[in-house]
Every structure is written in C-alpha cells, then in structure tokens.
Image: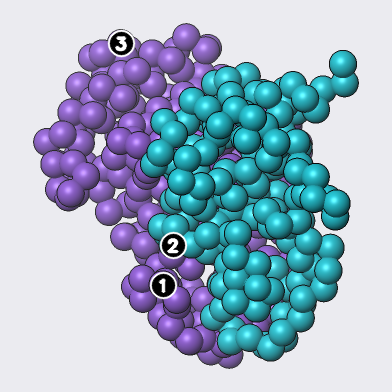
Chain colours: A cyan, B purple
Amino acid sequence: MKVTVTVNGGQVAAEVPDRTLLVHFLRDVAGLTATNVGCDTSSCGACTVLLDGRSVKSCTLLAAQADGSAVVTLEGLANGSGELHPVQQAFRAEHGLQCGFCTPGMVMAVVSLLEENPDPSEAEVRTALEGNLCRCTGYHNIVRAVLAAASERRPS
Amino acid sequence: MIPAPFTYKRAWSVDEAIDLVARDGDEAKFLAGGHSLLPLMKLRLAVPQTLVDIGRLRELSYIRDAGDHIAVGALTRHGELASSDLLARELPLLAHAAGQIGDPQVRHCGTIGGSLAHADPAADLPAVVLALDATLVARGPSGSREIAAADFFRGLFETALEPDELLTEIRIGKPAASGWAFQKFTKRAIDWAIVGVAVQGGRVALVNMGQTPVRAAAVESALAAGAGAREAAAHAATGASPSDDLNASRAYREHLARVLVRRAVEEALART
C-alpha cells in the first residue's frame, strides 16, 4: 500500500508491503538509521520515536498505522546548524551513554516525557524510562541527564 | 521479526469496520493499538489474512460521565485512562491500574478495548473490569448488545465476542463502596503480572490465576461474612487453577495470590 509519513518535517511516501513495520519504513525507506531494532518485542525501547508527538515503539506499529501522521526520529532533534537538542546535550554532558545503542530510543522517550511532565522527580524519571533498557550505564547518568535537561528547560 | 503477509484495510466508521471484518469471517481481525496483536503476529502465533485498522475511529475514544455510570470508548488509550481527571475522581481503580500497564510507549498505543478483547489472563484490565462489574457493549452486523464482564471472558484469549463483533464501549457503574486497590507482582518493571489483584468494595478479582481473569469468590464471601483482610486472603487461591510455567510454579502463584490479596484488601479498607 502507499504510505505517506511526515518524517522530521519532510514528506516520505512509498509503496510498501502491508506488513511493513514503522521501524523498517524509517530505516529502509526513509534511510534514517538512528532508530535501532533492539529486542523487536516492544520491550527494550531502542526503536522509540515520536508519533504525533508521543513516544511509541516503532517495532510494534505498522507503517500503515502511521500513514498521514508526523514522526520525529533522533535525526530530527538537532537543528539545521548542527546544534544538539537540549536532551542530547544533557546526555553528552552527563555521560548518559556508553555503547550508544539504546541512546536514540532513550533520548526520544525523554523528549516525550518532558513534554508530558516538564518537571519530573528522580523517581518519575526512573518510572518513565521503564520501557527503555540500557545494558551499559546502570541508568544513573541517564537519570542525571534527564534531570539536567528538565532543569535547563525551566525558565530561570 | 516480520508478520506473515496480510491485507491491511482501514475503516473510517464503526459500521465500515464491522462490514470489512464480516466479509472475511474468521480470517480477519480488528487492529486497534496493535500492542497485543502485532507481537503475536510477529511470532506467527496469530496469522490473520486481513487486518481492519480501527485506529482512526475517534468516535470510539472518549471517557464520559453518563450520570449513574462512566462510559469509556473502547479505543481509549491506557495513557488517556491514567491521566483522566474524571476517572481519578469516579473510578480511581481503573485510572491507577491503566497507569501500571507496560511503559509510557505502550500506554500511548494500547487501548482498553484491545486489551479486553485480547483476553490475556495475565493482562491487568480484564481483572479490573471484573472487579468493577463492568458492562461491555459489542456491535455486530445485526446491532449492539451488552455483555456483563462476568460473562465476557470465556477461556484463554477467548471472549463472548463473535468474530464480526466489535467491542465499542465499556460501561462502569459509579461504585457505591469507595475502597479500592490494585496490586501486582512482576519480576521486572514492564513484565506481565505473575499475579495481580484488583479490589473494588467487596469485589476481588485476580490477574493470571487461571485461563481467564477470575473473581476470588471465597475471599469475597469471607469479607461479606465479616472476616478481616488476613483471614479472607487465606482463601485467595481457593478454586483457582493458575498455570505452572517458566515464570512461576502453581504453588508460588497461589502463595502470591494470598499475599497480594491481603495487601490489596488492607489497602482498600484503608481507603474507605
């Protein structure tokens, strides 16, 4: 079927098999490979993207379900001049990553969290990241990064 | 993992959805949030020939105060249940339990109707609607009918719905007794409950203690006869036949049920 998705502000249209998953549409059709396939069972969160502003696991959605919607992937966060998004900056500053595989999904989950809850407590951050697994960091620096990004967003 | 091939159809109204599914009979499935169905399809445990996507039917997404009851559209997402002020006020059990499902990403997609129609005994909402004594509204080619939650769950992944019937609404009477609680035990954060318990007033329902969600009848009658939480909870596994699987033995589940029912009943009593 013909699927048209606004990806990071630009339209991507393609004729794809009905069973195409959104994550494969993003990686193989749109050519955006920051979004990773991790567990492929909606557990690990490596494939998290924003669908109409909310975090979703793109391995558990059909591309057809996103037809006509707006998707933002990690590639869509930094602005055109290469300046990182505040959440990306916070992950770098707080060393919220090691191998980096979970990072795109982690960052997208955090962007969605801060839209819904701009001032989360540490406990709320940990709960909100239940759907994103990291095998390297032990999460502490990720949580610090989220709290730093939240604090950065608040008007001083 | 990629699902077996199927034909994707999109419905723009409830009637169109029912018509599209009715045309393909047993080989067609409704697709709501897809968070129960697509994982099964990726494992090839479900191989429908046709998927009818009802995800655009905004007419099925609502939470309304209907006077003596609350009406919840079947396509309402778990995240919307969890953040609803109306539910927090009138049906806090439902709002709280919905907020415990999966993780934020799952709650952004998964729907109450999808969870109930999927009828996984390890899922949280089936037991919650039993504890709330909800009425489920199904629409098929010949019209709508009401099904009591107590009659809805027939077996493992099996409900009273006909293949061409769509669950459209969940009606829940405003509870007379205010005490409620929801407890579940998981090994890891986003796992399915090994055992869970939903309590509303004198009704107690169990997650993952059999092929369907079940009411803990022996606990309820003990409570009605004036037993305390600990005494009533001793009957939590009476009549239940939980599975013995890689997550837990039957004996362990029975033990967990007694512990969690005691905690849940104590919590509910503290809220009355």
Relative depth, front residue between A1 and B262: A1
On the same chain: label 3 and label 2? no
Task: Assign a secondary structure to mark 2.
Answer: loop
Task: Assign a secondary structure to mark 1.
Answer: loop
Relative depth, front residue between B24 and B272: B24
Q: Residue at x 59, y 84 (%)?
A: A18
**Can you give x and y, in whole percent of width and height, for residue A113 in the image?**
67, 37
Q: Identify the amino acid type marked 1.
A: Met
* Mark seen at residue A40: 2
Left or right: B88 as drawn, with respect to B238: right
Q: Identify the amino acid type marked 3.
A: Gly
Task: Assign a secondary structure to mark 3.
Answer: loop
Give me the C-alpha separation between circle 1 and circle 2: 7 Å
For the N terminus of chain B, which image quadrant? bottom left
Q: Chain of mark 2?
A: A
Q: Is residue B205 above or below residue B166?
A: above
Q: Quadrant of residue B130?
A: top left
Give me the C-alpha separation between circle 3 and circle 1: 50 Å
Disc 3 vs disc 1: Cβ atoms closer than 8 Å? no
Q: Which residue is mark 1?
A: B1
Q: Residue at x 76, y 81 (%)?
A: A13
Q: Quadrant of residue B65?
A: top right
Disc 1 vs disc 2: Cβ atoms closer than 8 Å? yes
Q: Quadrant of residue B33?
A: bottom right
**Can you give x and y, in whole percent of width and height, for residue A72 in the image?**
73, 57
* Mark seen at residue B228: 3
Q: Is residue B200 above or below residue A69?
A: above
